Amino acid sequence: MALIGARAGVRYRVMRASPPALLAFFYLIFAVIGGLLLWAPISSNANVGWVEALFTSVSAVTVTGLVVVDTGADFTLFGQAVIVILMQLGGLGLVTFAVFVLSALGMQVGLGQRLMLREDLNQSNIGDLLMLVRTVFVVSLGCEAAGAVVLATVFVPDHGLWPGIWAAVFHAVSAFNNAGFSLWSDSLIGYALDPVVNVVVPVLFITGGLGFIVLSDLQRKRRWRRLGLHSKIMLVGTAVLIVFAWIMFAALEWTNPGTLGAIDSVGGRLMAAWFQAVTPRTAGFNTIDTGEMHDSTALMTMTLMLIGAGSTSTAGGIKVTTFAVLILATIAFVRRESELHCFGRSLGVDEVMKVMALTTASMLIVFLSIFAVSISHDGSFLHLAFEVTSALGTVGLSMGATPELDTTGRCIIMAVMFFGRVGPLTLGFFLATHTVARVRYPPGQVYLG
């Protein structure tokens, strides 16, 4: 009886927890379970210890892609399958999976589950959540299947029938979920000049990074004028960032013998520059050696990793819409305007406050994490900052510092990856919770600038 009472008490406390707390709890539980599975002898060889297995699991659940062991060499087929499942769960959202299974079984999805789903999908209402979940699954599984079929035409001739098919499936799931895991230690450097890989993989992670709200909006409305403000900002912002990054990466690395300079043809350099321009928007694959990039290129890549992709997507970062609102708020301040205007719509002060809170929290995490990692690891400051930014943006690009970190450094990176995936959702919940001030104080003045 006492055991039953204890279980009932735990269940009551869990159900009383806030939706973002439950969401973070579920991500943590799946990360631990994944770590145990990857640590088992059936999943890995002797090179994978408990810390390495847990690090890989956290990286997969948070769809980051940072690794401390060789995914293809150190994990068996079973272990690689576990990583694929963790990437799929982390990319589409654990709660999304749960609600989809419940609805498929004909079970009623209650208010509590809808609230958790709302946080997982970063929505402000619970009205059309189940329809959005169906859209999520149809789009994601369809894109992954199509991507795997096309990639198989390249990987099967190179690696054989079944290894090639598995490589195609693995990389299609990893690409659409913006996870960045690869079965090869050099990621996709071996396919830097392959046109199929350089088109299919970016299309997958750009589609996944746009966000399911944008994809659903495009499917239903199909005309620019009828699209919502969020979709318009995402589409324009994504296009501008891609073009800007493509031009800048090509200009900065064109003669670098460690990156683009090692490619003889102009078309090959442009193709590699294209891939590296879009992958920081939290895909994590690379077709050139990121450790050989110039410092200026690394700084630009860090900025792109911090921005990330779209809300309600498989990607991370502070999101394109957040960055766009920051720019719009700055322009409005310079013009002495009291409201933000974009595509014939206005944004209020609440949106600006939310953006400022999210950006400030993210920057503080970056600075504190770089400080903490630099204490336990005496390496290049730029490389450490690059790894931390990649972890927070759940990108997975690396300049080689992560595998060299000690246990303390790896634990810090795991915490940053976890916050990068779950933190914005948790922060968004508190930002969406309005409270009425019981006490009002007289206005004061602070001199800025």
Image: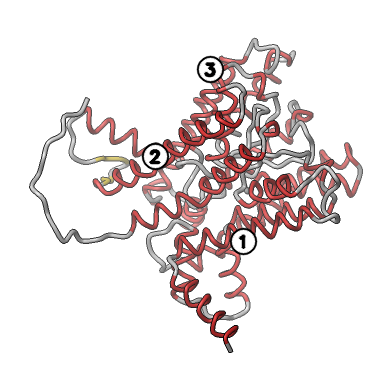
Nearest to N terminus: mark 2 or mark 3: 3
Q: Residues within 10 Å of mark 2 (few under 14, many from 20)?
A: many
Disc number placed over residue 296 in the picture, else none: 3
Residue furthest out toward the bottom: 1
In this rendering, position of residue 147 left or right of residue 232: right
Measured Cα–Cα span from mark 2 to mark 3: 22 Å
Disc number placed over residue 43 in the picture, else none: none
Residue furthest out toward the right: 160
Nearest to N terminus: mark 1 or mark 2: 1
Which residue is at the front of the view, 324 or 439?
A: 439
In this rendering, position of residue 125 left or right of residue 286: left
Considering the numbered disc 2 on the image, is that residue within a helix, a strand or a loop? helix
Considering the numbered disc 1 on the image, is that residue within a helix, a strand or a loop? helix
Measured Cα–Cα span from mark 1 to mark 2: 27 Å
Disc number placed over residue 29 in the picture, else none: 1
Instruction: Give the residue at x 49% y 59%.
Output: 120
Q: Is residue 159 visible?
A: yes
Q: Is residue 238 visible?
A: no
User: Does the CB distance between marks 2 and 3 fall below 8 Å?
Assistant: no
**Percent of width and height locating residue 276:** 62, 28
Instruction: Give the residue at x 58% y 89%.
Output: 1
User: Which residue is labeled 2 in the image?
Assistant: 359
Q: Nearer the viewer, mark 1 or mark 2?
A: 1
Looking at the rendered structure, the number of numbered marks drawn on it comes to 3
Q: Residues within 10 Å of mark 3 (few under 14, many from 20)?
A: few
Residue type pointed to by label 2? Thr
